[in-house]
Amino acid sequence: MRPLRNPVIQSILSHVLAGWMQFCFRTIRWTYENRGVAEGVWAEGGGVLCAFWHSRIGLSPSCWPLDVAQPAKALISLSPDGQFIAKAVALQGFPAVRGSSANKDKAEVAKGGTQALRDGLKQLKLGALAITPDGPRGPARQMAEGLPLMAKLSKAPVLFIGMSCSPAIRLKSWDKAILPLPFSKGAIVWDIDRFPADGDLAEVALDWTARLNAVEARADAITGLTE
């Protein structure tokens, strides 16, 4: 059995990761850019989609205060790795809406994706839904049409969030995920858009890919993080 499939190991590791992340977030020297965009969304209340690339999941709890009007949930995959990450994020106040399965059975993948769409739209009637539009297995920084489709159906605004810290732990994963280190330099950059009335899903996905790349690149430029 793979270690991450063991629920006991999952629980232990998720508690360790959550504690580490919280300690790091408290000691990181943060720079915020375009925070007024996010504050406007928080003041307005209502549903909002929060998008960031999969590599920045380890920084994601830092971008959403728990005391704002919108309760937030995270759309995370049904894979064993997704379960582990979901538990660590949930321990910090962000429960999961479970996403499409990494299982190779196409029927199960479709079933998981459909249920995730329904559950995500329900969440958007209450508050925020965080999505990694290149997850759970990439290709990295390439947006599928799931985020634009959810924005079109819900009519919720989309916050593009770039997060960075340096120095950081860089994992040898498909997305080169980063985990924070204490007392590092951090940055969070926001941008916002809505699905256009006459928009095409594929074209919007390309445009939003560029927007999301831009805020992440800006955050990396502030911290000095490099590949």
Image (cartoon, rainbow, N blue to C red):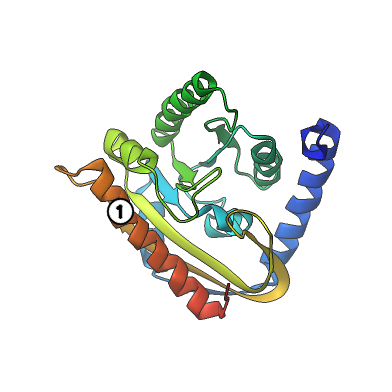
Give the number of marks: 1
Q: Report which quarter residue 197 is drawn in.
A: top left
Q: Where is residue 184 shown, x and y percent of the image?
A: 67, 76
Q: Report which quarter residue 171 is drawn in.
A: bottom right
Q: Is residue 145 visible?
A: yes
Q: In the rendered view of the protein, which quadrant contains the N terminus?
A: top right
Is residue 52 or residue 28 the one in the foreground?
52
Q: Badge 1: few (under 14), some or many (20 or more) residues near its Cα, within 10 Å?
A: some
Left or right of residue 145: residue 13:
right
Q: Where is residue 8 shown, x and y percent of the image?
A: 85, 34
Q: Is residue 49 above or below residue 62?
A: above
Q: Report which quarter residue 29 is drawn in.
A: bottom right
Is residue 182 or residue 202 the one in the foreground?
202
Left or right of residue 59: residue 213:
left
Per the image, the residue denoted by label 1 is 206
Residue occupying the point 32% across, 37% down: 149
Q: Is residue 210 above or below residue 166?
A: above
Q: Is residue 43 visible?
A: no
Q: Is residue 38 above or below residue 111?
A: below
Residue occupying the point 78% across, 38% down: 4
Q: Where is residue 85 shown, x and y percent of the image?
A: 67, 44
Residue occupying the point 62% across, 58% down: 177
Left or right of residue 39: residue 104:
right
Is residue 96 or residue 135 the one in the foreground?
135
Q: Amino acid at mark 1?
A: Leu
Kindly state the secondary structure of the residue where label 1 is placed: helix
Q: In the rendered view of the protein, which quadrant contains the C terminus?
A: bottom right
Left or right of residue 181: residue 162:
left
Q: Is residue 64 above or below residue 79?
A: below
Q: Where is residue 76 shown, x and y percent of the image?
A: 57, 39
